[in-house]
Amino acid sequence: MQIHEIKRPKHIKTAKRIGRGGKRGTFSGKGSKGQKARSGVHMGADFRGGNSPIWKVFPKKRGSTKKVDIKHRSFHKASSDVFPINLSTVAKHFSEKDVVSRLSLLEKKIIGSQDKKVKILGSGEIDKKFVFEGLTFSESAKEKVLKAGGEIK
């Protein structure tokens, strides 16, 4: 076997060299104008469209053990992991001595399938006896359920 007879493995491909003219048209696959169309472009991982990098936004504190509360808008969650339900909603959708669990709330379409935890809040009044299974409660909701004669398992 001679050196000129060696073939390149098929899984190794050369990267396409864009921006050199040829069959790729006027702009050679780089779009038209702008920072990313120029040669030598480098936009780092901290680039935020011209805004300050995220590590420059937060205040600097002395020492490596100082923790800074994150109060920046880009770090807030869109929603929490706990889905709150008021007692008034439970009283409206369930009848006397029904079992209220995550599955029964899913069947009645009160919660979505992606909601992981459910917490019962004490807003509203109940006069029916319910059996709650596998849910978390606020203090006021727990008092109202037990006062009405319901069960919490």
Image (spheres, rainbow, N blue to C red):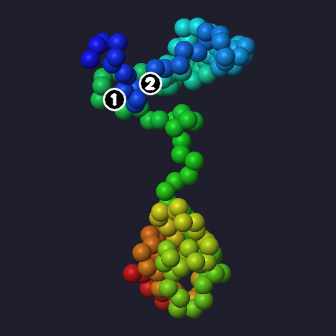
Work out which residue is located at the far left of the displayed protein and give it. Answer: 1
Tell me which amino acid carries mark 2.
Answer: Lys
Q: Label 2: which residue?
A: 13
Work out which residue is located at the far bottom of the displayed protein and give it. Answer: 96
Q: Is residue 99 above or below residue 4?
A: below
Which quadrant of the view contains residue 67? top left
Nearer the observer: mark 2 or 1; the answer is 2
| Distance from the alpha carbon under mark 2 to that under mark 1 | 48 Å
Tell me which amino acid carries mark 1.
Answer: Lys
Mark 1 residue element: loop
In the depicted view, which residue is nearer to us: 120 or 3?
Answer: 3
Residue 139, visible in the rendered structure: no
**Which mark, residue 76?**
none
Percent x, y for residue 111? 58, 68
Percent x, y for residue 54? 50, 25
Q: Is residue 73 left or right of residue 136?
A: right
Q: Is residue 82 above or below residue 102?
A: above
In the depicted view, which residue is nearer to us: 145 or 152?
Answer: 152
Percent x, y for residue 100? 51, 81
Q: Label 1: which residue?
A: 66
Q: Tell me which residue sits at (49%, 56%) in the image.
A: 81
Q: Tell me which residue sits at (60%, 84%) in the image.
A: 94
Q: Earlier in the sequence, mark 2 or mark 1?
A: 2
